[in-house]
Structure formats: C-alpha cells, structure tokens
Image (cartoon, coloured by chain):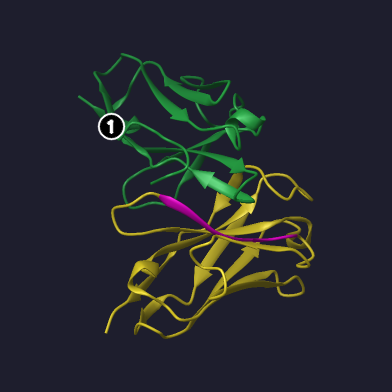
Chain colours: A green, B yellow
Amino acid sequence: QSVLTQPPSVSGAPGQWVTISCTGSSSNIGAGYDVHWYQQLPGTAPKLLIYGNTNRPSGVPDRFSGSKSGTSASLAITGLQAEDEADYYCQSYDSRLSGSVFGGGTKLTVL
Amino acid sequence: EVQLVESGGGLVQPGGSLRLSCAASGFTFSNYAMHWVRQAPGKGLEFVSAISPNGDTTYFANSVKGRFTISRDNSKNTLYLQMGSLRAEDMAVYYCARVGLPAASRGWFDPWGQGTLVTVSS
C-alpha cells in the first residue's frame, strides 16, 4: 500500500488529454511538501517529468503540466501521443516517515 | 554528461549479503545528497535509503532498517548500499538517484542510474 494514492490506469485516444491524480495526507502533500512526477517507459529507469509541483525540466514538452492543491496533486497530459504510453509516478516527502514517498504508479494507455 | 552507473547486483541466497555501487560522473558528487530507490518485479517505486552530501546523515525505509547500510566515498565519486539478511521481498531492481539541487537533503530525483537487479532465491 503506497503512501500516495494514484489510479492504477488511465487511457485516452491520440490527441486527447488525460489527468493523473496523486492523493496524500497531512504528513506529506498536505504539509506543503512539493510533488514531483516521473515517467517510466517499459524496461527503462524513471525520468523526471515535473519537479516542484509545476516545473518542467528542459526537454520535457509543454504538453505535460503539474498542479497541486491541498493534499493532492495532478499531472495533465494534453495532445496524447503514442510515445506517452508509460507508467507515471508521483513523489513527495513524508515528515512522519522521514523519507521520500511514491505513489503506486499509473499506467497510461494510448488507445 | 551527468551520469550514474550502478553495479553489484546478482543472485544471492536468502539471508545473504550483497554490496551495490553507484559510480557518478559529470557533476560535483560531494555537493549532492544521494538516494537508493528500488522496484520489485511488476511493482512500483520504493524509497530505500538516502545519504547527505558529506555522508554524516543517513535515512532508511522501515523495511530495510537494521539490515542495510548506505555510504559514500566522495574521493571516488561512488555511492554504496550494503545489504544484509536479504529476504525474498528485497528482490528488485535497485536504482541510485541524485537529489535535484546541491546541498538539498530532499527533493526530486534527477538523474537516475540504469538500475541493477538483485535476485534473492535459494
């Protein structure tokens, strides 16, 4: 059972948009700790997608955006492309556990 | 190019030990906190351990506390994870990852290494 809760799967057609939620609690996201997002393509290491809730590293398309409110955060992907098919993970810090915590991951299927 | 390369994974019997290494290049290793994150087959990501830039502060997930130790050699730009009393549930790909900002104790992870597989089986 992951500390941060994500839907196991989401799907969308090419060109559409999807959102992935990440729900935490008062000891992590709700305490004000930043949320970060990673994309993991099959058979590869995770890659940073969004840091500090809303920031994109250089090279990440602006089709990807992040937001945070209260004890939750969301990743939005617009203009879905076949190459976006991957697993997506949120990450934050938990003061009660004194360590980083991850969501269980969401598998994105592009129909 | 900023790069992390793990090594040391392999097959180990339950109760055995293994030491993983993570060689860093392309940045000033001694300025950054480092983490180990693992991923069991078909499962999600799990924080394992973290170490401060100078090595004087360490953190462990409850699942590995007392069995794993983390260390670093800043003169060799290398991070280590000494794993002991290994269990079936420790079987996973182990990634090393750099914290995003120098001197920060926590934050985002970038980059990640390619991972090294640890198999625990008799």
Q: Residue at coordinates 40% horizontally, 16% vertically from top-left?
A: A78
Residue A5 belongs to the span the image colors magenta: no
A77 is higher (above) or lower (below) than B57: above
Q: Is A78 on the left-hand or right-hand side of B107?
A: left
Give amino acid for label 1: Ser
B88 is higher (above) or lower (below) than A14: below
Q: Quadrant of the C terminus of chain B?
A: bottom left
Q: Secondary structure at mark 1?
A: strand
B28 is higher (above) or lower (below) than A15: below
Q: Residue A76: percent from the left, percent from the top?
A: 44, 20
Residue B1 appears in view = no
Task: Identify the chain of the residue marked 1, using the numbered disc in the image.
Answer: A
* Magenta-colored span: B45-52
Residue A59 appears in view = yes
Number of residues whose C-alpha sits closer than 10 Å to that of mark 1, classed few (under 14), some (14–19) or many (20 or more):
few
Residue B47 belongs to the span the image colors magenta: yes
Q: Give the main secondary structure, helix, strand or loop, of the magenta stretch.
A: strand
Q: Residue A3: percent from the left, percent from the top?
A: 47, 42
Residue annotated with mark 1: A9
Q: Residue at coordinates 73% horizontally, 55% vertically from top-left?
A: B32
Q: Residue at coordinates 33% horizontally, 31% vertically from top-left?
A: A7
Q: Residue A109: percent from the left, percent from the top?
A: 25, 30
Q: Residue A61: percent from the left, percent from the top?
A: 49, 25
Q: Residue at coordinates 31% horizontally, 14% vertically from top-left?
A: A15
